[in-house]
Amino acid sequence: MVGVIDVSVAKLYAVQVRSGAEERTRKLLVRALENLVDDCFTPSYETKRAAKGQWRTVRMQLLPGYVFVQAREPEKVAARLAEVPAFTRLLGSNGEYFMPLSADEEAWLNAYTDIDTHVVEMSEGVIEGDRVMVMRGPLKGREFEIRRIDRHKREAELEVPMLGRVKRIRVGLEIVAKR
């Protein structure tokens, strides 16, 4: 049957929120959707920033402007979003049908982020000639996905198909040596 949603399996949906207010909105969503979702999170990544001469590990939003919910009944989630006192919109919604993340998008998130904290840990690597070799972290073995490296900010930029289009996503990468 067309249009029937299998409610036995919870799927991952993206909720668009105001950029910069992801964590605040996530807390509102947890309260409003407590019995409708299995999980509600904002994926982030670890990187290092200098403050007062000291390098500190900080967390930044992996996908600014989005909160993810794992739900079985997206139409009930969409209806409850109207009660949240912040801008929220379930992606893929044309009013009747809601599009979950594709299997590839969900697999990418699960491969890179810690399953419990939803954080992409900092990777470490070296540059040998014109090639990057990642020694540890989630980028190890996935160097081919790196499009650009900002050594000053200690970040790598990846191009990833996400939310129906190719997005440039930043993750933490510290280059510890150049050979």
Image (cartoon, grey):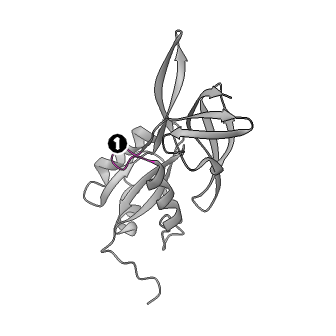
Tag 1's secondary structure? helix
- In this view, the residue farthest toward the bottom is 1
The x, y position of residue 117, in whole percent, is 36, 43
> Taking 10 as reference, is 103 left or right?
right
**Range drawn in magenta:** 113-118
Give amino acid for label 1: Lys
Mark 1 highlights which residue?
A: 27
The x, y position of residue 97, in whole percent, is 49, 73
Q: What residue lies at 55% left-to-right and 17% top-to-bottom?
A: 50
Q: Does the magenta segment cover residue 135?
A: no
The x, y position of residue 20, in whole percent, is 52, 36
Tally the numbered discs: 1
Q: Which of 139 and 177 is in front in this view?
A: 177
Q: Magenta span: helix, strand or loop, mainly?
A: loop
- In this view, the residue farthest toward the right is 130
In this rendering, does residue 91 appear at all? Answer: no
- Image quadrant occupied by the N terminus: bottom left
29 up-or-down from 96: above or below: above
Q: What residue lies at 34% left-to-right and 42% top-to-bottom?
A: 27
Q: What residue lies at 67% left-to-right and 27% top-to-bottom?
A: 178
Q: Nearer the viewer, residue 156 or 70?
A: 156
> Taking 54 as reference, is 24 left or right?
left
Q: Which of 104 and 176 is in front in this view?
A: 176
The x, y position of residue 49, in whole percent, is 54, 22
Q: What residue lies at 69% left-to-right and 35% top-to-bottom?
A: 128
Q: Which of 32 and 55 is in front in this view?
A: 55
167 up-or-down from 124: above or below: below
- Image quadrant occupied by the C terminus: top right
* Label 1 Cα neighbours within 10 Å, binned few <14 / some 14-19 / many ≥20: few
125 up-or-down from 75: above or below: above
In this rendering, does residue 131 appear at all? Answer: yes
